[in-house]
Amino acid sequence: MRTDVSIAAPPSRIRGLSQAAGAMFLVGTLAGVSGVIQDYPVYGGQALRYLLAAAILLTVARLAGLRAVRLTVREGALLAALSLFGLVIFNVCVIEATRHGGPALVGTVLGTVPLALALLGGRPSPRVLGAAAVVVAGATLATGLGSGDLPGLMWSLGALFCELCFSLLAIPLLPKLGAVRVSAYSAALAVPLLAVTGLLLDGTAMLRVPTLPETLGLGYQSVIVTTVAFFLWYDALPRIGAATAGLFAGLIPVGAIATGAVLGLGTPSAPDLLGAALVVAGIVIGLSAAGPPAPATATATATAAGSPAAGGRQPAAGAGSPAAPASSPATGASGRRSP
């Protein structure tokens, strides 16, 4: 299977690379505000986060003239799965993994996203595999191996699976819906799912009036980590492909380190800085392995014209489209979308 979804012209590729880097860095900044909202009911807080993000994204879609799109049964199932696994269950897994093994364990496991996407790419070159391994090593070093028990490891592996779903399940939806609508619809679907989970686990205590710091923290999660980062990531995927974009997942711990330093939460240690340097080196190696992008073909031009950045107005991709490779399980064919 191939996870790359288009042949991007240089300007589009540069934009995609910048957006993927920005998205993952912003996701990493989440660690800087986690302490502010740690006392707020988790599931109720996440439901509020996605409710505000969905409201913002739906307003943006309306102002941009992006009308609601009728989905097929298959597309609706993909969107529901994206929201369930990529958003809701991902949050549950991270929460439970942190309780059992601490943030270091789940951070280390999520650091393997680049390697996992490289392996899912079908036949990655040794150089791409090597680059992914360097990114994983850097993310692991920056995060710290930590310690944990078997349940913590299993929850962390669940978070890794959901992070891969966050990218792979979105790929066949992006040509038709575009980045804004995929982000908005998935966030909106996550709200009732999180609300039900919160009611089952916490009852009426799932919600309370947040303090001012909690309000600011939840607002940052909604506007920056969800609204902005989701759009950047989903707009980048069709431009550079999931395998290339996955390399930037190594920037998550880098974003956490930078945020901690800016907020005065701690000075980066030598392993932190060395890990960040390894991540950057791995990304550079991985990008250079792909070489210069191929000249845009008529198909690639058509893809760019109907890209998520253009509102995603092109028809749904067929089995042979660059946006949904025939060998991709996300298309339903014999051969298969993660802060």
Image (spheres, rainbow, N blue to C red):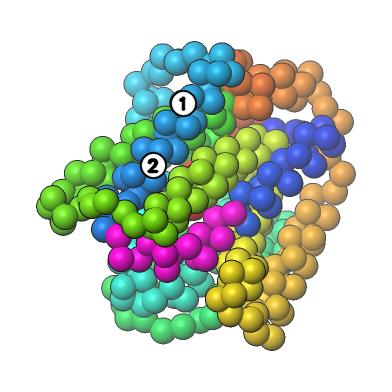
- Residue found 34% across the figure and 21% down from its top: 73
- Residue found 49% across the figure and 69% down from its top: 107
Q: Which segment did they paint magenta?
A: 26-40
**Secondary element at image label 1:** helix
Rendered image: mark on residue 58: 1
What amino acid type should be assigned to the residue bearing mark 2?
Tyr
Viewport quadrant of the N terminus = top right
The answer to whether residue 21 is visible is yes
Seen in the image, is 221 located left or right of residue 240? Answer: left
**Secondary element at image label 2:** helix
**x and y, in percent, of residue 269 in the image:** 65, 84
**x and y, in percent, of residue 47 in the image:** 31, 45
What amino acid type should be assigned to the residue bearing mark 1?
Leu
Camera-nearest residue between 32 and 15? 32
Name the residue that disc number 2 marks. 50
Q: Is 27 included in the stretch rendered in magenta? A: yes
